[in-house]
Image (cartoon, grey):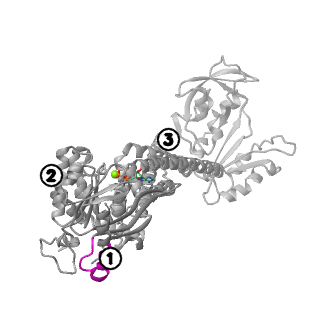
Amino acid sequence: MTGHLPRPARLRPADLLRIGLIGPRTRRLRSALSALGIALGIAAVVAITGISASSQAHLLDRLDRLGSNLITVSPGEGYDGTKVPLPREAVTMLGNIAPVEQVSATADTGANIYRTDLVPSNQTNSLRVLSARLDLLRTLRGQLAAGRWLDRGTERLPVVVLGAAAADRLGVTRPGTKVWLAGEDLPGAWYGVIGVLEPNELVPEIDDSVLVGTPQAVRALDGARTPSTVYLRTHPERVREVQEVAAATANPAQSSTVAVSRPSDLLKARTETNTALTGLVLSLAGVALLVGGVGIANTMVVGVMERRGEVGLRRALGARRGQITLQFLIEAVLLGLFGGLAGAAMGVVVVYGYAAVQDWPAAVPLAWVVAGPAVAVLVGTAAGLYPALRAARMSPTGALRSA
Amino acid sequence: MSESRTTGESRTTSESRTTSEYGRRQPPVLLLDKVVKEYDGDPPLRILHDIDLTVARGELVAVVGPSGSGKSTLLSLIGTLDRPTSGRIQLEGHDLTALSDRQIAALRARSIGFVFQQFFLLPGLTTLENVATGLLYTGETVGRRHERAVRALREVGLAHRLGHRPDQLSGGEKQRVAIARALVGRPGLLLADEPTGALDTASGRGVVELLLQLNAQGTTVVVITHDRDLAASFPRRIGLQDGRVEFDTGNETPAPEPEPVSGPGPGHSAWRRPAQEGTA
Ligand SMILES: Nc1ncnc2c1ncn2[C@@H]1O[C@H](COP(=O)(O)OP(=O)(O)O)[C@@H](O)[C@H]1O
Ligand SMILES: [Mg+2]
């Protein structure tokens, strides 16, 4: 019997978890505060990436609804740098291209818009007053936020439909309001607002515009007879084809002065990952994790000092140094894990909340939701290493004596 | 003093012979041979000087002496919490100097129970969990640990306090929980460092009675106390003074086989018996 040495025993994983939880369980507030740093850091990262992803999802959603088969044709610059207007027949010519399914256009006028006739004439709000064809709304798949669109009757009357940003800047929210249209060579006149458009991400220039019927513009507002922008809806699979021939079709004599673009390309570019944002998020995450790690390390160092007696007792009960290390290391890892999980959860809640308020689809950044807690565990490990080794290095007698 | 040292030494030599020749039959639980403990310093601080000591199985020993005489230091060495600067300690027939830290920790987990003046109960755990912690490092399952903890708590008269937390217990109850934690693994050797030091007389007496009871069941018990009255009730007293054994009343009655219950066989010592009783 005496020859038999007891075999060294291992702690079971469940026991390790149990003793790792003693610290956090008995010092709840302190543990929660120490995990807060990591939680906030990870919440911020999840929230920012999630909100950005939700915004992108929203844009793609909108793009889907607005269609990526819209082409705009507008006057470009000639060799001397001046704008070369499109020919008057450009709209008809472009509409005759086989895959073009719809066509519409706007044209410049000589008028500016003011909230009242008392506003000085140089305060134009940088809003453009344009004449619009009746088919413009349908071609752009525009939506009315309020009121009505122009029709055969109202296109001959002193009435306007406001783009979303224009309405905003003028402070007009409902139809029925009167606005003042005047220009350098024009006598001013009151126009009634009959409609306000929803924002349209594909054609932001319409958001900033005030639209008047073509007959009224030509008669009273010095409306141009050449188009300022022609909008084409093409067959969805033949957009490129139309894009290639649009310039030559619009102005066969000077095709190089015609600007052709596909607004959905711009919109798509906006949805692509923003590297500046990613860098910002990563550095933010780095700082937060560093601060969080220091918080955990600090809590652990204090905890180990306070628990010298426990360390001494555990050694007396047969714990090896390695088992003491493991206990405190697991405690730190758990703090990191709790912080990481709480942070990921907070971030997800923020994303859902923000998306709900913005009426966006919520896009939860799964990679970050998973990586957050994983990284937090690594941070917890790093933060716990020194305190854990310090606890293990204590001599049992010293620990018992000083406790 | 010189007399007791002589008897100690003669016993030591006879014991080491016994250990080598008939060791399997009756080794001493504890054997110290010229044990010296120094702490670093210039010159080194010598706390214990050439301590020779033998404790046989089933003994009940009081270590007395003034504060600072080295009692706790001696108990740490016996309890394998610290290693001597020189000299040899044999526990259960194992020469501690020959063992690795890992082996010593395992030996400590199985063979030694500690009781301290400050109890060292973990505040976040219930009475039951605190006692079960006494088996944590032996590799037993949690179910088995709790089962044995309940039994140990019943033995110290605290079966009705299983779910209480340390701060809900009186000092005497706390120390009884600590004793339950020390005895739950049925160690052959129970070491108590001033177990009544933080208790009032009545609770202190209860604790001492518990220790006596454990000893009567076969556990070897070494108790440190600076209370000479209390020590007087112990069959063997060892007096420390300035790190030396001042007197040792000796184990005149060298604890004949404490086998009130029929043992499992000659190869088995009383040391192990209660634990095996549990497994049977
Ligand atoms: N780590 C240490 N370093 C230096 N001296 C120590 C250390 N531990 C204990 N001592 C000294 O050893 C002596 C004996 O201490 P101790 O064994 O605790 O005495 P007792 O338990 O008899 O009161 C004391 O003088 C104490 O100051
Ligand atoms: Mg002491």
Residue marked by disc 2: B160
Q: Position of residue A70 (x, y in %)?
A: 63, 50
**Residue kind at label 3, given as amino acid type:** Gln
Query: Is residue A317 shown above or below A193?
Result: below
Q: CA distance from mark 3 to mark 2?
A: 60 Å
Q: CA distance from mark 3 to mark 1?
A: 86 Å
Q: Which mark is residue A250?
A: none
**Residue kind at label 1, given as amino acid type:** Ser
Q: Nearer the viewer, residue B254 or B204?
A: B254
Q: Which residues are magenta?
A: B12-28
Packing grade of label 1 (10 A; few <14, some 14-19, many >=20) is some
Q: Do marks 1 and 2 share a subunit?
A: yes
The quadrant of the picture occupied by the N terminus of chain A is: bottom left
Q: Do marks 3 and 2 share a subunit?
A: no
Q: Which mark is residue B16?
A: 1
Badge 3 vs badge 1, beta-carbon distance below 8 Å: no
Classify mark 1: helix, strand or loop. Answer: helix
Point out the frontmost of discs 3 and 2.
2
Q: CA distance from mark 1 to mark 2?
A: 46 Å
Q: Mark 1, chain letter?
A: B
Packing grade of label 3 (10 A; few <14, some 14-19, many >=20) is few
Q: Residue at x 61, y 57 (%)?
A: A235
Residue marked by disc 3: A358
**Residue kind at label 2, given as amino acid type:** His
